[in-house]
Image: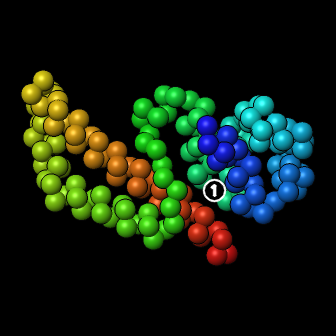
Amino acid sequence: MPEETRNIYKTCRKAAGLTQEAAAERLGISVESLRAYETGQRVPPDEVVEAMSDLYNTLHLIVRHVREKNAMYGRVVPEVPQAGVLEASARLTNRIYQFADSHADRRLMRIAEDNVIDGNERPEFDDIMEDLQEIVAAALALRCAQQADCRSSM
């Protein structure tokens, strides 16, 4: 497992420029608990991860935490790449234009108009859903990037 994945809590804390002691105090938890989360000995509760996300100024921490904690999450929400605002904006805009240029929206409406996805329509429907997942991932990446950029400029 890559270092960043194992220590996402530590990586985000360090990126925020906080020591374990300072972070634990501001999070209202013990240094021992924070150390256990950062070494993978324990999984932090969701409310602690939410506080970490606010303190460390990164929504991406929540996305990674939930994805690793719950395998079903990955079936619904795509992998969210980390990117800066400019890169994430460009990726989202490009994915939307590609979707529109391919007329996937119109094809989706044709498939859905009878409220049934038959065997002949299923492959095309699945392809359209993959395209939409890419748009969702790009939008989430932009949201994560925007939050970090906005707070760091305050």
Q: Position of residue 37 (x, y in %)?
A: 77, 38
**Quick one: 27 or 78, which is closer to the camera?**
78
Please name the residue that numbered disc 1 is placed on: 58
From the viewer's side, name the closer residue of 126 and 45: 126
Residue at image coords 90%, 44%: 31
The residue lying at 18 percent from left, 49 percent from top is 105
Q: Residue 131: where, in percent of width, then height? A: 27, 47
On the image, which quarter does residue 138 sit in?
A: bottom left
| Residue 143 relative to residue 60: left or right | left
Q: Residue at x 46, y 44 (%)?
A: 79
Count of residue discs:
1
Judged left or right of residue 145, residue 137 is left
Q: Quadrant of residue 5?
A: top right
Q: Position of residue 154 (x, y in %)?
A: 67, 75
Left-right relation of 38 to 124: right
Viewer can see residue 26 = no
Q: Characterize the local packing of mark 1: few (<14), some (14-19) or many (20 or more) Cα atoms within 10 angstroms.
A: many
- Taking 126 as reference, is 59 above or below it? below
Q: Give the SS element for disc 1.
A: loop
Type of the residue with mark 1: Thr
In front of the other: 66 or 68: 68
Q: Residue at the spot x=64%, y=47% of the render?
A: 4
